[in-house]
Amino acid sequence: MGEPQTGPLLTTPLHALHGELGAKMVPFAGYDMPVQYPTGVLTEHNWTRTHAGLFDVSHMGQCFLIPAAAALEKLVPADVLGLKPGQQRYSQFTNDEGGILDDLMVTRLGHPGHEHWIYLVVNAACKDADYAHLKAHLPADVTLKIADDLALIAVQGPEAVAAVAALAPELATLKFMTSADLPVGGIWAHVSRTGYTGEDGVEISVKSTDAVALTKKLLADERVKPIGLGARDSLRLEAGLCLYGHDIDTTTSPVEAGLTWSIQKRRRTEGGFLGAARVQKDLADGAPRLRVGILPDGRAPAREGTVVKSADGQAIGTVTSGGFGPTINGPLAMGYVNRRFAEPGTPVLLEVRGKDLPAKIVTMPFAPHRYFRG
Amino acid sequence: MATVKYTKDHEYIRIEGDTGTVGISHYAQEQLGDVVFVELPAAGKAVKKGDSAAVVESVKAASDIYSPVSGEVTAANPDLEGAPATVNDDPAGKGWFFKVKIANPAELDELMDEAAYKAFLDTL
């Protein structure tokens, strides 16, 4: 994610609005994106945890597969056939070795007449490779419809749904990981009760041409403020959620990554997806390493790439995401360690600038999830 | 009256006699964003001009602070451990990082004065 790209940066439909809002823009996954607005990352993070933050995530890839449930099951370990209309699941594209090509959201549309449509949201940095992967593996009778005419706007936080429901009252009762197609403030949208912050909230897919109008309606609510990629990262880290290219990649299996919960029971036993042999082996024998939360005892953050050591100084793993959590008001990290050291409470050392700093393995999330399960 | 000089990496050094107080400029704190952690050198540590002498961390990233001059660290700001955001609130005052006994005053001539630093900022 965020690797250097050649050629001019792409922009989202909200690009000019970010400028009007005073955003500091940075290149991210080939797009010119807001990293923060004038109040800064800490304030934006805290606002999202206490009110509602609006995130432009239009750089992410949106596409539809028609009809695709059975075909898609060959590429992801989630139960796609079992998705009810409107239901959403988190999953991963696996490769032949059981590594992760990308992580994604999979939804069966609930709109009448469209229940055979599967809607995917994939990472911006991976989307071209994902589409090529889909084209290479899907049978000829499945249509891949790349929806580059759609924007995606996330609204996250304890007041997010109240603010969005002021424009679409039916959304108040929508449950976590389900979706609905309906007008929001008069603008037709596909709304999912989901997000990447650990908070209650929604992601709203709208026509690019409607994105500015909808964003302005949402920002007119004083509970909703624009939030940049900086706070998006600290929020997801506190929520213990993986960032592709950092916490998961082609070398990590979903089991090592602690994502077994996203592989439904039928798929664990039946397999039938790329790399199933490794995933099933990891399930049966235990993965050699596991993704864990790591909480430093002191105040120094341990960044990505920091070596994790056992209490007696042996290297046992690596930090894959690390920084400062405004909600927990301290440093936090996640990474992979040898499974013998993965038990919560295990004391470890983090090698920061040549010094071994004490830390311990902890259960994630660092900040509690507050999803609406009805 | 104390003289203040600047590096191209946006550190300042306030010179009083043979001692300099080192911190980062207003521009630097603005670029870094919210400071959440500062690692400072211990008193007695010898530093060389251009060496990483301290580390300042924002939510997003860690940045090195380079010593503007060579010399011996005589004090580190004890208030930054508990209140790192002081670097944002008052970079030129209470947000100082460390004091250094200047070994070679000639090194100061290689630094920018206030007017030169302002002109340098205009080029960024």
Image (spheres, coloured by chain):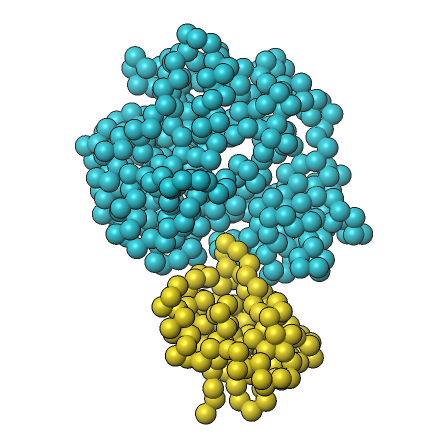
Residue for point 41% across, 77% down: B116
B20, above or below A134, in the image: below
A36, above or below A198, in the image: below
Q: Is the C terminus of chain A in the top left, top right, bottom left or bottom right quadrant?
A: top left
B43, above or below A343, in the image: below
Residue for point 57% across, 46% down: A321
Task: Name the outermost residue toward the top.
Answer: A141
Frontmost residue, A247 versus B69: B69
Is A299 displayed left or right of A138 in the figure?
A: right
Could you say where residue B97 lies in the image, as x and y percent from the top left?
Answer: 55, 74
Q: How many labels does the image show?
A: 0
Could you say where residue A309 lies in the image, as x and y percent from the top left?
Answer: 74, 49
Frontmost residue, A253 versus A264: A253
Residue for point 78% across, 52% down: A313
Could you say where residue A255 lies in the image, as x and y percent from the top left?
Answer: 63, 29
| Residue A166 shows up from this direction | no
Residue for point 60% across, 48% down: A304
Task: Name the outermost residue toward the right.
Answer: A312
Chain identifier of the yellow chain: B
| Residue A305 shows up from this direction | yes
**Would you identify the image quadrant in which residue A281 lies?**
top right
Could you say where residue A327 lies in the image, as x and y percent from the top left?
Answer: 48, 53
B100, above or below A33, in the image: below
**Would you identify the image quadrant in which residue B76 lies?**
bottom right
Is A224 displayed left or right of B7 in the figure?
A: left
Chain identifier of the cyan chain: A
